[in-house]
């Protein structure tokens, strides 16, 4: 029975690594294509703005360049959602910090564990922290 469990764990580990590698590959491809679309879109508008038939001045080129940069930054900010990622990562860090304080002080879900039950409290602590981390990964 132990041999089958050990073999299964190894198979599952391999399957997880394979899924993660494929996920990274497809994420890179999608992000690369999305980047191409965003920069291509902003470039098309920039080139159209420069192709007015009028003489180019420093001001018109600078204005068009600044407009291009702002458009690209706005697109990346909207697509990659840095604010949301930051918020959820901080939320996870806060939740884990609360767990640390609760287990150290013996409060909240850890109040039922007295001295001599540190292993059980640690087991519960580990499970709760892993739950927080898994939730963060799903986001």
Image (tube, rainbow, N blue to C red):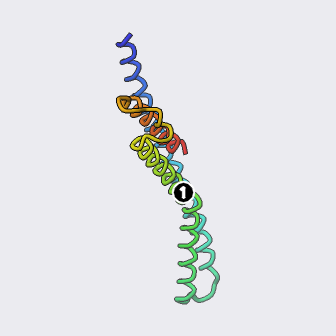
Q: Where 85 sits versus 121, above or below?
A: below
Q: Position of residue 116 (x, y in %)?
A: 35, 29
Residue pointed to by mark 1:
80
- Residue at image position (45%, 37%) is 130
- Residue at image position (63%, 75%) is 48
The front one of 8 and 90 is 90
The front one of 111 and 128 is 111
Q: Where 135 sits versus 87, above or below?
A: above
Q: Position of residue 120 (x, y in %)?
A: 40, 29
- Residue at image position (54%, 57%) is 80
> Which quadrant of the figure has residue 78?
bottom right
Quadrant that contains the C terminus: top right
Q: Position of residue 84 (x, y in %)?
A: 56, 56
For residue 48, side relative to residue 30 (left or right): right
For residue 94, side relative to residue 122 (left or right): right
> Residue reaching furthest top?
1
The front one of 91 and 1 is 91
Quadrant that contains the N terminus: top left
The front one of 48 and 99 is 99
Q: Position of residue 85 (x, y in %)?
A: 52, 54
> Residue reaching furthest front?
114
Q: Residues within 10 Å of mark 1 (few under 14, many from 20)?
A: few
Q: Where 76 sits versus 136, above or below?
A: below
């Amino acid at each position: 029975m132990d041999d089958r469990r050990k073999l299964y764990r190894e198979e599952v580990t391999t399957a997880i690594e394979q899924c993660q590698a494929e996920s990274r590959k497809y994420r890179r491809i999608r992000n690369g294509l999305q980047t191409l679309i965003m920069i291509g879109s902003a470039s098309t508008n920039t080139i159209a703005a420069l192709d007015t038939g009028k003489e180019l001045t420093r001001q018109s080129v600078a204005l068009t360049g600044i407009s291009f940069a702002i458009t690209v930054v706005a697109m990346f900010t909207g697509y990659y959602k840095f604010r949301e990622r930051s918020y959820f990562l901080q939320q996870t860090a806060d939740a884990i910090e609360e767990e640390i304080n609760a287990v150290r002080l013996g409060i909240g879900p850890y109040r039922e564990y007295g001295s001599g039950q540190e292993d059980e409290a640690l087991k519960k602590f580990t499970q709760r922290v892993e739950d927080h981390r898994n939730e963060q990964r799903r986001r």
